[in-house]
Amino acid sequence: MNGLENVRIALRGISANKLRSALTVLGILIGVGAVIILVAVGKGSSTSVQNRIKSLGTNTITVLNRGRFGAGTARTGTQSRRIQLTMADVNALQDKTQAPDVLTVSPVTQSSVTATYNGATYSVQVTGTTPSYLDATDYHVQAGRSLTEDDVTNRSRVAVIGQDAVSNLFPGGVNPIGQRVRFGNATFQVIGVLAKKGSNGFQNQDAVAIAPYTAVQDQLTGGTTFNQLVVQGKSSGSLTAAQAEITNILASRNDTTAANLPFLILNQGSLLQTSNSTNETFTVLLGAVAAISLLVGGIGVMNIMLVTVTERTREIGIRKAIGAPKSVILVQFLVESVLLSLIGGIAGVAVGLIGSQFRIVGVQPVIVPYSIALAFGVALAVGVFFGFYPANRAASLRPIDALRYE
């Protein structure tokens, strides 16, 4: 008996019990579809987190005052004092002899204020900094111009603002460039509009105004210290070396050790690596949960095939009595179980691909090609594995016992 004949007999057996076969196929379909969709959700979640981290900047290291997280005063040596980031720290980190892997250092002072223009109001975060900040944090000026070093030196009250600030402050048709906007109690002139950037998970990056730090300190925050420093490394591969240089310089300037440094240093490369590791584990767990449903579907195949063997015992006896060898009977029932899994696998792949086009719990799934091949391959393996026992049981029946079966 050739392979085509086995397939024809298997299809006839499947169509003889349409509802039962459909339910068996449904079990495999759900398993395969679940594997593809859940792995896609895991990948989509990972991609979303990585994009949010990357939106914080390109090859960046952020130095934060620990006090921002409630640590209060920092302790160095035997004296307890509040340590702040200053322009002297910026100059030290820009020294190429001490920090050869550092490209730029951008001081940052921030204040959340209400922006006002002709009666319209909107809450924005004003960031006082230098021109290098925009490149380091991947901001792009869509219209107008960016900040310049002259703006910083001259303490100019100018700002570039985000898209949400523009849409909420200015009525349609009004060009924001050149307009004067009140931030809190200070008036700044809009010189540029930033390209849309979205949220990074912590902050709406379009509800911002970026201005020279000198003007922001004069008009809004006061003092001469900074909330944070945004340091850009020369390349992604040099971030670890740059972090070590930053740590050593700041520790030396504050008469302390790296372990007791009163600042929090966040390395974008380390954040991405940690995020990747966490999300890979998350994706594997989701795939494992989905694989359980595929296993259940396989048990359903085995159950149906055992019932099929029982119902067709007399047929098996007749075929063996007229000379059909054990291998032919084995292959016949094995082909039927694999065919059920094949149909379920194909339908499951289709459902998985369609389901992955929709957002799930706020995540846009990203299809992983290997998950399709893996799920489909496992579905076929399930058909072989769970179909072998019933098929072998049918092939092992003695003709006389099969013919006498009622």
Image (spheres, rainbow, N blue to C red):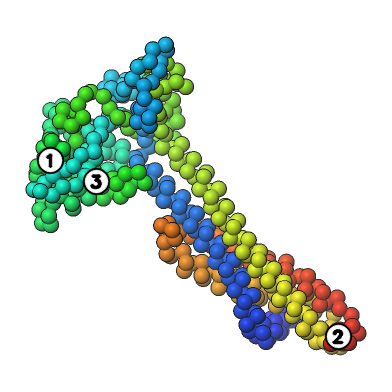
Mark with earlier residue (1, 2):
1
Would you name the residue on which mark 2 appears? 405
- Determine whether label 3 and label 2 are within 8 Å by CB: no
Q: Which mark is residue 182?
A: 1
Q: Reading the chain from its start, which is encountered first: label 3 or label 2?
A: 3
**Looking at the picture, which amino acid does disc 1 mark?**
Arg
Q: Secondary structure at mark 3?
A: loop
The one nearer the camera, 146 or 264, is 264
Residue 175: percent from the left, percent from the top? 11, 51
Mark 3 or mark 1, which is nearer the start of the sequence?
1
The residue under the point 38% across, 32% down is 69
Task: Identify the amino acid type marked 3.
Answer: Ala
Residue type at mark 2 is Tyr
Q: Which mark is residue 207?
A: 3
Q: Is residue 283 left or right of residue 180?
A: right
Q: Residue at x 42, y 46 (%)?
A: 50
Q: CA distance from mark 1 to mark 2?
A: 94 Å
Quadrant in the picture for residue 161: top left
Question: Label 3 vs label 2: CA separation?
Answer: 79 Å
Q: Secondary structure at mark 1?
A: strand
Name the residue: 44% across, 60% down.
360
Question: Vertical placement of 322 versus 204: above or below?
Answer: below
Check contact, mark 1 vs mark 2: CB within 8 A. no
Q: Is 255 situated above or below 209?
A: above
Q: Which percent across, then down, holds residue 355? A: 47, 67
* C-alpha separation, residue under disc 1 versus residue under disc 3: 15 Å
Mark 1 near mark 3, Cβ–Cβ under 8 Å?
A: no
Q: Residues within 10 Å of mark 2 (few under 14, many from 20)?
A: few
